[in-house]
Image: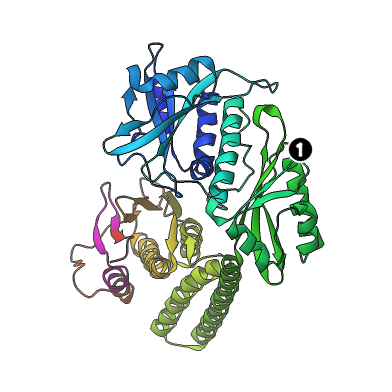
Amino acid sequence: MSTLRDLAEEHTQLRPADIDHLHRIAGDWQLLSDLSFADLLLWVPVDDDGTFLCVAQVRPTTAPTAYLDDQVGRIVGGPEVAHLEVAYRQGRIWREGDPVWYGDVPARHEAIPVRLRTADGEAGEVIAVVGRDTNLSTARTPSQLELNYLTTADDLAQMIADGTFPPPRHPGETTSAPRVGDGLVRLDAGGKVTYASPNAQSAYRRLGYASHLVGEDLAKLHRRLASDPLDGTEAANGILAALRGEGPPRREIDARGATMLTRALPLMPAGVPIGALVLVRDITEVRRRDRALITKDATIREIHHRVKNNLQTVAALLRLQARRVSMPEARVALEESVRRVASIALVHETLSMSSDEAVEFDGIVDRVASAATEVAATEVSVGMRRTGSFGVLPAEIATSLVMVLNELLLNAVEHGFPPAEEGVDVPEPEARPEVVVTAHRQRKQLHVSVADNGRGLPAEFDAAKGGRLGLQIVRALVTGELRGSIELRPGPTGGTEAVLVLPLAKA
């Protein structure tokens, strides 16, 4: 399904600023849909002959939908959209007309013109129409809650027609909470509560306010309830800003071990401030889980830090032992073990500084590659280069993969560019000695190659058989822990290439 922007750009002459405004409306109109107990459809004119295109749709969570089928992408004209044409041409909310039928569902049509205000704050031209269609199959005498919802919905609808809704969104805010069903409080122009839904009353009771909210000055109440005076002042100032017609950021109030999120919206139909709408949500359990996760994350990072320290201690002991061993073969084996332990410690060091169990792997590869050129037993100066990106990898993949790359890089340097044997003339290489690590992702797989331009594989080499300990470790890790495949082959322009294919999705 095409997006709102795709449909508008393909079928209309709307400007980018117009489309951005429609995006803002679609990001906040669940509020209006729930208050209206109605479906909202965003229609844009296709041409001057009265044809309209539906570019977005939202269904209410407080009532049954009028449309079982999705309407986005539908182009209609003629008598079916006469109410949209009136709202678009005359710039007024259309509410007249008899109910219509969609199959077996009776529905009431309304049309709300959408304006984008100019840079100097004046009401601009109508750029689209919001269709408000209510399912009448369950019509009954409305309750006090429903009457307050509908009254507030009419005020917001007029603000859409004026170009003053939705208010600007603040950085980092989403549209997920709080919503109408979480708790709604309506204020008059003086900041006094004229209505509070049962869920809103319950949320304030959690904060320690047991009396009824109607008649209370909500800004002063927030100051009294908040455990932290600064939080109470900020929440109160947000309400006062909404009463002045501004769109303040959301605030949290902590009191008596409970936490409530508040969102204040100005109500100013026809440009006249008549009060504010305050949505509230009890997020006590959410914040409790957040604190538990923060504690857990800190504990995990501390564990990774201690594992890193322990591995570095093991590496130091192995290095000390290697210095005291007289047998060259034993010394080489211990030095290789030091490098393997150090590469694993590098992953845990990165995880100890991360907020989750994943690491940005490119930096680790660069450090391992640099270390391989420094410790490899070769007289040749070998360059290291990485192309592509590994991206972010989970810890269980990163720990094994860093060992694999460590072994492959050391093999590429030491065996691709071995030291010259005494009495044997070695021709100068045609190109600068180099090892290239390449990585890219494709269809939930990570493709990695380690290629050198050295002397290549020996004629008698058989990758399927034993080989050195390093290659045995590589094969075991790739086919076992990483559930992937490895191929050692001659490079396309000489040298040797190791090709890895690793699944990124869990089996």
Which image quarter holds the C terminus?
bottom left
> What residue do we see at 72% from left, 38% from top?
246
Q: Secondary structure beneath disc 1?
A: loop
Observer-nearest of 179 and 492: 179
Taking 295 as reference, is 391 left or right? left
Residue on which the image places disc 1: 244
> Could you say which quadrant of the image residue 49 lies in?
top left
Is 66 situated left or right of 293 in this image? left
What x and y, as percent, mark residue 256? 71, 71
- The answer to whether 226 appears left or right of 316 in the picture is right
Q: Is residue 98 left or right of residue 313?
A: left
Q: Give residue 262's position: percent from left, percent from top.
A: 65, 53
Q: Is 497 colored magenta in this rendering?
A: yes
Segment colored magenta: 475-499
Is residue 188 within the magenta segment?
A: no
Give amino acid for label 1.
Answer: Arg
Residue 120 in sight in this render? yes
